[in-house]
């Protein structure tokens, strides 16, 4: 299968401390890939580096076979979009003004709003269901709407590959599902390659074709959720005991943490005794 | 009526999405600027009706009116307008670059650098009789160089794998404080006569502007502002943050350096000819943001005009309110600006 992104011997660091060590990673084209791992394991750093927001210490990132550092940044922007973790829109900026900026790599000073720009921006607004909000200020929207506006901006970039760093953080469960469904459909209908960092393991299993678990600066495991997610992996990657069963709706792996908590099962047993 | 109008010309070779409201606001601001320009030219020791002022502009009017308008008033009013435009545009750029609506030309220490240069100039080139040993004409150049050196210094100090807005502000505040200390030190050590002269300069005034000043200031301001208008797209994207800007293919660090150079040049020319007129660079872009939103294509032109209006009004009040005493325009911009700043802080505290 064709690879959308590859890293070769990629080492990443912040100052002296190494975050990712000599990683060789392949991300398949046209699939949803999700990075998982404990806090501070470097999954966001890896994503940022793939998006050229962070220079590798050594090694390279390749986009469809070409070294990203050797491409013009605008050409990269036409193939790959990134939505970073937290983005703040300037006060009073409207949704349309924000989404329109996704067209940046295609614009010149004289061509700032071509028919194509207009069509793609409208499509992005439609796909994210925020057409009616386009004249509202971004900072006046709810969390879910705001996130959709940012996603619309990345869609307006009209790229094969979309990277998202924890797109569901700060959203309630309903909005999380809504955003992930949206990304799922983009992948399904337009076979775009989606790479994201997610914290919720169960949602990751449900939406991802391909899971990359990161631990100790390296890839711990990679593959279909059904093949890689089990209680041993969770124990090793997250340092947490759990039981893995099947999601009752989707049949995908579902992780139930052991931990502590009120135990109704036990209490019931005790009441009978 | 829809908010935006799509403009496409020459078979799609030129295309824009125009904000109707911004055009309307800009039109009103332009009319207001022209109006205040004319009124201000007419008011003074000898009052000339607005109609006569227009007549003089067109080459008519009495000889006396011509003398007062063209020799005494026009140069300083044009300087006031240009200085206001420069400061407002520079402030708008800095606010976008630093991504903070409270940023202003003073915060990066650039005005402070110019002040040190001016005070130093007055102190070092004075002889025992308090006479300047070189022509006062060199003062603007000294101010400009001072502004430039400090801007470079702040930029270099803030450098760490590129320049982050946050580090720029921190370094700017530090360097600002240092410059203030230097200014005070030199004013105390220098001749007393020079200290008061320096003080007027630091407060900011357009008094004593000449056509020579105008002939330098106008082409510089106009060309810098035109360059800025070609860069609004890059500013818009940078205001979304470095990550987003890089993600859509903008050369963030290169653009930031260019913005820094242009805003320093704008501040430098205005400081050179009118001293440290405060708060215009803070207020004008902020008011403009309220009126037309934060898209720079609309924000900067409107901000420029508001800046021009503010300085022209401050100068008008300064030279008429306590006549025959001249109060520097900077006193009035600060008198409105400082409370405005407190109001802004107060508002952000509550949001």
Image (tube, coloured by chain):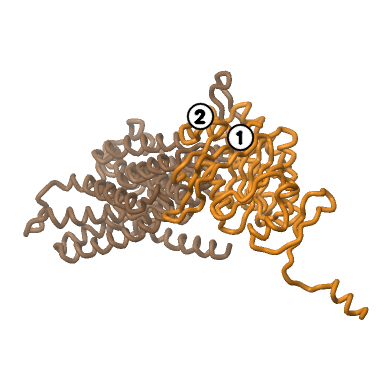
Chain colours: A orange, B brown
Q: In which chain is the residue bearing label 1? A: A
Q: Given the current orientation, which residue lies at the most extreme front position?
A: A232
The picture places residue B264, in percent across and down from the top left corner, at: 34, 46
Is B348 positioned to the left or the right of A162 in the image?
left
Picture quadrant where residue A243 is located = bottom right
User: In the image, which disc is placed on residue A4?
Assistant: 1
Up/down of B237 relative to A172, above or below: above
State the separation of the CA atoms marked 2 and 1: 28 Å
Is B27 positioned to the left or the right of B328 in the image?
right
Q: Identify the image quadrant of the N terminus of chain B.
A: top right
The picture places residue A153, in percent across and down from the top left corner, at: 62, 40
The picture places residue A110, in percent across and down from the top left corner, at: 51, 27
Which residue has dot 2 on it? Answer: A108
* Residue that appears at 60% across and 52% down: A214
Q: Identify the image quadrant of the C terminus of chain B.
A: bottom right
Picture quadrant where residue A135 is located = top right
């Amino acid at each position: 299968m064709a690879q959308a992104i590859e890293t070769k011997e990629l080492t990443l660091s912040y100052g002296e401390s190494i975050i990712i060590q000599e990683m060789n990673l392949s991300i398949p084209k046209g699939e949803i890939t999700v990075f998982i791992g404990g806090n501070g394991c470097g999954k966001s750093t890896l994503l940022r580096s793939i998006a050229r927001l962070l220079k590798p210490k050594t090694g390279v990132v390749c986009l469809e076979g070409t070294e990203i550092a050797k491409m013009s940044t605008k050409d990269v922007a036409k193939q790959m979009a990134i939505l970073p973790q937290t983005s703040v829109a300037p006060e009073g900026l409207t949704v349309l003004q924000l989404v329109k900026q996704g067209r940046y790599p295609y614009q010149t000073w004289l061509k700032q709003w071509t028919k194509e720009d207009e069509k793609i921006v409208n499509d992005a607004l439609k796909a994210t269901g925020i057409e009616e909000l386009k004249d509202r200020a971004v900072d006046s929207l709810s969390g879910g709407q705001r996130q959709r506006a940012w996603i619309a901006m990345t869609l307006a970039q009209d790229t094969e590959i979309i990277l998202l760093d924890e797109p569901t953080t700060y959203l309630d469960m309903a909005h999380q599902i809504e955003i992930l469904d949206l990304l799922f459909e983009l992948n399904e209908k337009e076979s775009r390659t989606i790479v994201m960092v997610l914290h919720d393991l169960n949602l990751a299993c449900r939406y991802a074709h391909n899971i990359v678990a990161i631990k100790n600066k390296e890839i711990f495991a990679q593959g279909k959720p059904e093949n890689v997610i089990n209680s041993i992996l969770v124990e090793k990657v997250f340092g947490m005991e759990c039981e893995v069963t099947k999601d009752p709706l989707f049949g995908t792996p579902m992780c139930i943490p052991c931990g502590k908590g009120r135990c109704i099962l036990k209490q019931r047993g005790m009441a009978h005794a | 009526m829809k908010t935006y109008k799509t403009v496409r010309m020459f078979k799609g070779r030129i295309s824009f999405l125009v904000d109707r409201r911004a055009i309307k606001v800009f039109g009103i601001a332009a009319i207001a600027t022209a109006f205040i320009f004319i009124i201000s030219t007419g008011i003074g020791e000898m009052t000339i009706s607005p109609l006569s002022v227009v007549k003089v502009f067109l080459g008519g009017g009495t000889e006396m009116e011509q003398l007062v308008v063209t020799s005494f008033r026009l140069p300083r009013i044009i300087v006031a307008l240009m200085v206001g435009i420069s400061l407002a545009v520079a402030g708008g750029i800095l606010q976008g670059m630093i991504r903070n609506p409270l940023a202003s030309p003073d915060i990066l220490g650039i005005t402070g650098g110019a002040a040190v240069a001016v005070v130093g100039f007055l102190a070092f080139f004075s002889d025992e009789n308090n006479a300047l040993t070189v022509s006062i004409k060199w003062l603007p150049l000294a101010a400009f160089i001072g502004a430039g050196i400090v801007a470079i210094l702040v930029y270099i100090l803030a450098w760490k794998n590129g320049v982050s807005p946050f580090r720029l502000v921190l370094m700017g505040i530090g360097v600002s404080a240092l410059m203030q200390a230097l200014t005070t030190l030199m004013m105390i050590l220098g001749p007393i006569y020079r200290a008061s002269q320096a003080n007027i300069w630091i407060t900011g005034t357009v008094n004593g502007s000449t056509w020579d000043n105008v002939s330098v200031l106008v082409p510089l301001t106009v060309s810098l502002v035109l360059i800025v208008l070609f860069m609004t797209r890059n500013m818009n994207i940078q205001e979304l943050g470095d990550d987003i800007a890089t993600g859509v293919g903008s050369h963030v660090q290169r653009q930031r350096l260019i913005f820094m150079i242009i805003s320093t040049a704008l501040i430098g020319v205005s400081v050179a000819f009118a001293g440290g007129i405060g708060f215009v660079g803070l207020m004008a872009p902020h008011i403009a943001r309220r009126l037309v939103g934060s898209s720079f294509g609309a924000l900067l032109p409107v901000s420029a005009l508001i800046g021009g209006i503010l300085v022209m009004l401050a100068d008008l009040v300064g030279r008429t309110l306590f006549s025959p005493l001249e109060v520097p325009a900077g006193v009035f911009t600060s008198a409105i600006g400082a409370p405005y700043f407190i109001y802004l802080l107060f508002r952000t505290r509550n949001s």
